[in-house]
Image (spheres, helix red, strand yellow):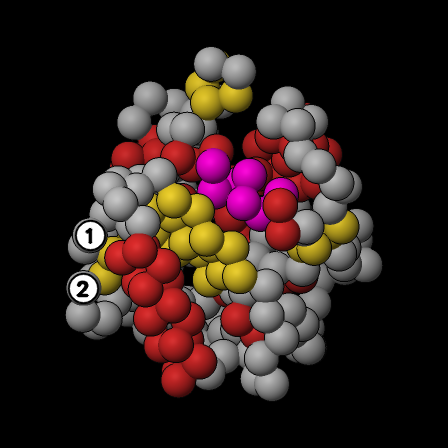
Amino acid sequence: MTLSHRCLCVFGAASLLPLAAVAQAPTDLVIRNATVMTASHGTIPNGAVWVHNGKIAGVDATVSYMRKLPREAPPGTKWVYKTGETNLIGVLVSSATHKSLADYLSEKIWRPYGMEQDAVWMIDDRGQEPGGCCISVSLHDYARMGELILDDGRIQGRSILPTGWIEAATHKAVETGDAGGGYGYQWWTRDDGSVDARGIFGQGIHIDPKRKLVIVMSSAWAHATDRKQAADRTALYSAIAKAVKT
């Protein structure tokens, strides 16, 4: 499976949707669109919980919900951050590997990289972890996740990712309207070469390859998103980076 494969494997596979639903599923959506947030589904509430009607029995909630949304624009033409598209990536990974996200993460990264503590990943009523949220990790292990990116995805000298993946993922793929930044493959990119993972309520991982620096922030903002506090977080990252020699 590559970024150019169509998402029909999720929206239309007989194991996931009734055959009658295949004709209604989008066929021009490729995996890359979801990876860089340009799938252009209609309005999707960001956050951990969706409440919606018309769920198809036995079908993942992400697929059931998103397949009914109208298109905002042709796939690949409009960027809008939507957690649902990251959830969709999680469904794709589970479908391709025939494993839960937690099991796959444990097998490929958690145990081989020597994470300090067990992580906790919430599941839905089908036992599926949402790809876009709800994983609890210790501060040290979040930092190790950042170090794995700095190490170019290598564990004990062996790469667990395709050649060039980290470089491609952490470079601007689409414009977001933010001065000095953009969006890559699920990473917020900066023109100075650093990248961020941003979570609700102020969670964050900042990775600066030039300084070999990883900054992790665990927070409890009063609201899931807050522009001022987000700006303060960015300013803190920048202040720490300036104090570290390249």
Which x, y percent locates residue 5? 38, 36
Whether 50 is drawn above or below 165: the answer is: below
Q: Which residue is mark 2?
A: 180
Viewer-proximal residue among 100 and 234: 234
Residue at 58%, 47% in the rendered image:
142
SS at mark 2? loop
Q: Which residue is mark 1?
A: 192
Q: Which residue range is magenta in the image?
A: 141-147
Which x, y percent locates residue 236? 38, 68
Q: Which three-letter amino acid code belongs to the residue tagged 2?
A: Gly
Whether 149 is drawn above or below 197: the answer is: above
Residue at 46%, 22% in the rendered image:
154
Measure the C-alpha gap from mark 1 to mark 2: 8 Å
Viewer-proximal residue among 4 and 193: 193
Which-is-in-front pick, marks 1 and 2? 1
SS at mark 1? loop
Q: Which three-letter amino acid code belongs to the residue tagged 1?
A: Asp
> Of marks 1 and 2, which one's residue comes earlier in the chain?
2
Q: Main secondary structure of the magenta part?
A: helix
The answer to whether one can see residue 113 in this image is yes
Viewer-proximal residue among 223 and 31: 223
